[in-house]
Image: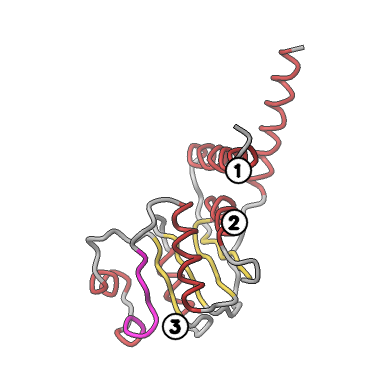
Amino acid sequence: MTRRVVLIIALIWLFGFVYYNLNMPKTAGNVTTDGVVVLTGGQDRVERGVDILNHHLAKRLLISGVDKSVSLKNIATTYKIPDRLMGCCVDLGRQAIDTQSNAIETATWIRQRGFRSVRVITNNWHMARAHFELARSLPRDVVMIDDAVEVQPSIGIMFAEYNKYLFRRALILTEGHF
């Protein structure tokens, strides 16, 4: 009986892993939102956020999870952000250290500005967990648009990310039951 249960759990995990990999999100296209949030840590994320601002598809950009040692000038130089955008429309979030705190930082930023819609930019392999955390933190009336930067992650990254996603979901399901 125990081997059968283990086999069933392993098959469910395997099918979930395959589904997860085959259904990674894509870019959102030219959708307009009040704000755009970039979760730091991955290739082409900040560039995508700046592009959204340059095309007037959002009013403001939050770069969440920026190290305290990084200045606005560093960001502007590294990502070639014009002074006009840096001065009016770019905020650096320095509180987040992981996906869960990215969600809290983003929710605070959205509430402070009274935004009703937000585009969230992260890599495709990270979007499911980011969406899950943000959906738990954002006000219920805020529309969230997933805008995934498409990259080809290694199988190791996919394995780790899928397990982190499952772990967070399981942790939330069991919250308060122990």
Left or right: 75 with respect to 43? Answer: left
Question: Mark number for residue 172?
Answer: 1
Instruction: State the separation of the CA atoms marked 2 and 1.
Output: 10 Å
- The three-letter amino acid code for the residue at tag 3 is Asn
Which secondary structure lies at badge 3? Answer: helix
Residue 154 colored in magenta in the image? no
Name the mark nearer the viewer: 3 or 2: 2
In the rendered image, residue 92 lying in the magenta stretch gets the answer yes
Residue shown at 32%/84% (left/top)? Answer: 87
Left/right placement of residue 24 relative to residue 43 reads: right
Across and down, in percent, residue 117 comes to 59, 75
Q: Residue at x 42, y 75 (%)?
A: 50
Q: Which residues are magenta?
A: 85-93
Provide the secondary structure element on which disc 1 rests.
helix
Which residue is tagged 3?
A: 54
- Residue occupied by mark 2: 136
> Residue 61, located in which quarter of the rendered image?
bottom left
Residue 89 vertical position relative to residue 39 in the rendered view, above or below: below
